Image (cartoon, rainbow, N blue to C red):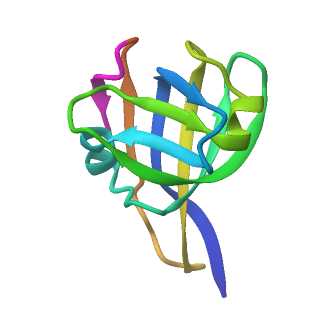
Amino acid sequence: MKIFVLKSKIHNARVTECKPEYEGSIIIDETLMKAVNIIQYEKVLVANAENGNRYETYVMKGKKDSGIISINGAGTKYSSVGDRLTIFAFAAVEENEVLKPNIIVVDAQNRIKIQK
């Protein structure tokens, strides 16, 4: 039987911009994506530490080392510039399969502070 487990986590990411007119998604700095093994167009769960909102979207690759975390489209109703987010990606694995998640904690400029 397949179950969903945590694959990737970016903790404490700060929203750097919001674009409500964009067709949708979250743009994440390519360096952060690579550090946690998230790929472009992958579905993610976004949890906002400021207001408790949670929503799903897909990832677009942002400029490497830019620190960008851009919320676009409908997601702008749930997050604002400066909000702290946790971004999760999950994988389907066999029930007895062990998967060690890739986890990073970032600072206020979205630079990697801790990598687990």
Task: Give the farthest residue toward the front.
Answer: 21
Judge whether 21 appears above or below 106 on screen: below
Comparing 6 with 57, the one in front is 57
Which of the two residues, 39 or 61, is positioned nearer the viewer here? 61
> What residue is at 32 percent from the left and 25 percent from the top?
67
Residue drawn at (34%, 48%), measured in percent from left and top?
36
Residue 66 picture quarter: top left
Out of 23 and 9, give the one closest to the viewer.
23
Image quarter (top left, top right, bottom left or bottom right) of the C terminus: top left
Q: Give the range drawn in magenta.
A: 109-116
Say left or right for 45 vs 6: right
Q: In this view, does 18 lie to the left or right of 29?
A: right
Q: In the rendered image, which quarter contains the N terminus?
A: bottom right
Residue 17, percent from left and from top = 51, 23
110 inside magenta stretch: yes
Name the residue at 37% across, 23% down.
106
Residue 104, how many percent across, how many down? 36, 35
